[in-house]
Image (cartoon, coloured by chain):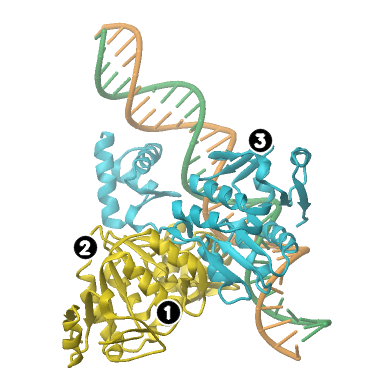
Chain colours: A cyan, B yellow, C orange, D green
Amino acid sequence: MTFQKRAHKILELLETYGEVEIRQLATKIGVSEVTVRRDLTSMAANGLLYRTHGGAMKISDVIKPVSFANKAEVNLKAKDAICKRAAEDIAEGDVIFIDCGSTAFRLCQFIKNKNIKVITNSLPIVNELQHSAVTINLIGGEVDASRQAIHGTMALEHISRYHADKAFLGVDGITAEGLYAGSEYEAANTLAMAAQTNCTYMLCDASKIGKTSYLKFNNLSIVDILVTNYNGPELNKFQSKGISLSPVTV
Amino acid sequence: MTFQKRAHKILELLETYGEVEIRQLATKIGVSEVTVRRDLTSMAANGLLYRTHGGAMKISDVIKPVSFANKAEVNLKAKDAICKRAAEDIAEGDVIFIDCGSTAFRLCQFIKNKNIKVITNSLPIVNELQHSAVTINLIGGEVDASRQAIHGTMALEHISRYHADKAFLGVDGITAEGLYAGSEYEAANTLAMAAQTNCTYMLCDASKIGKTSYLKFNNLSIVDILVTNYNGPELNKFQSKGISLSPVTV
DNA sequence: TTAATTATGATTAAATTTGATCGAATTAAC
DNA sequence: GTTAATTCGATCAAATTTAATCATAATTAA
């Protein structure tokens, strides 16, 4: 029995039952479980099925995640502590930028009752602050459903029209060499906001410190204050680059 | 029972009851409460549900309270009929403006599967079209929580940057003398969109015809096509002013 | 036929999944 | 506000599944 014949058989069974188990396939096809496992791995790599622990499922039966809005975040405690610390620096009457990252989102809860103006490209933040004391300016442009945010040329131009006292931004990673983002959009947005701000706060839980990512988009010069729960040797390097530290404990 | 199967079951129960408890899920699925808790945490992380203390809720009940507000609308049947008629004129590839009124919102259901670009200042429309075939361009500016829309100088300027094939707009009232709006913002928005469009559709259920309101903001010259379920003597006057009629029956 | 490549099966260490337990955190009751 | 009852998150252990390694069988090319 060749691989092609087995693959055909597996897809047939998947079509009938919606899901299959490795043991069941091994007996039904008459090969070892190792071979079935290999077949499933290769078929999954080609997008023919969805691999589960102990078997496989039809692709169409797999549930796709819909929105990141209410994401049960990792490092929530750290992020909340960081945002609480950052919020202490926000004064009544301030105009602030907030980016669309998951860390900055946690800032909302601490600023709901402040009389400030928030400029953001994040839809969840708009939802969150909608009926609060905060005045919201939503950045216009293309809607990115997966990131629940606005981006594009128009968004950058929108940002360039405004000027804020402070910007509260996140990144995918930060090292002494510079800032790292997960996409061009995030990078462009971060740079645009930082350019129109008196004081840029970088909100980074410990997992971001020393981490590199897809795109290195700038050196550290745009960062004024680093708020983090990280407490290690890297911090000195940041300080020597002129960044003020605002350490928090979780 | 794999994680994927349990996830299916949980979403199914969630769909039926709107909310679920951990204990109930554990017995129903036949796994420990610890496992259910883990499943819910992971599903919440993927945005599949909203985690509560002791269970979970459907995400749509939590995240989209805005679009639900429009359910208790008056003249829903008429509005739907009007929007269905209007949607027939929208071709693949079209770029269209949609304003933030309650009538135009009903257009969403009829365009979800079209490959078009929608430019709007309405937050409920963004929510509604977020995971559809439609590309969304959200107009930036001040967020008006009560109207669930964006307005202001920046919004008008944003609109002026774009050009659409068609605009689908509503008004507070329309007579042979002109168009009436409930606020300066609505009026400015309507004018801005109409100015950047080849063909302006006015969506008006019968209650708007012949009605005047707070602010008369323009004559009828900006209107190209009037879609309405109204069927009375006023219609001739509109026609004599150069407006095409697109009548619907409820 | 022989050498080389590929596919299969067995074995074992690593990774996942699940359930149990317990202190911490949250909610409800008073 | 304080206390009691749940619920949560973290950690550990057991069971299962997986990936990696290696040896053997089958297939192919020279």
Q: Is residue A17 visible?
A: yes
Is B64 situated left or right of A117 in this image?
left
Q: What's the mark number on residue A177?
A: 3
Residue at the (76%, 42%) spot, across then down: A242
- Mark positioned earlier in the residue sequence (2 or 1): 1
Q: Position of residue B174 (x, y in %)?
A: 30, 86
Q: Which quadrant would residue B54 be assigned to in this image?
A: bottom right
Q: Is residue B39 left or right of residue A176?
A: left
Q: State the residue at coordinates (25%, 87%).
A: B176
User: Mark 3: which amino acid?
Assistant: Glu
Locate residue A4, reporting x and y percent: 25, 37
The reply to whether dot 2 and dot 3 touch (C-beta < 8 Å) is: no
- The quarter of the picture where the N terminus of chain B appears is bottom left
Q: Amino acid at mark 2?
A: Ala
In front of the other: label 1 or label 3?
3
**Chain of the residue on which disc 3 is drawn:** A
Q: Quadrant of the C terminus of chain B?
A: bottom left
Q: CA distance from mark 2 to mark 3?
A: 50 Å
Secondary structure of residue under mark 2? loop
For disc 2, the marked residue is B91
Numbered marks: total: 3
Residue A135 rendering spot, x and y as whole percentages? 59, 71
Q: Secondary structure at mark 1?
A: helix
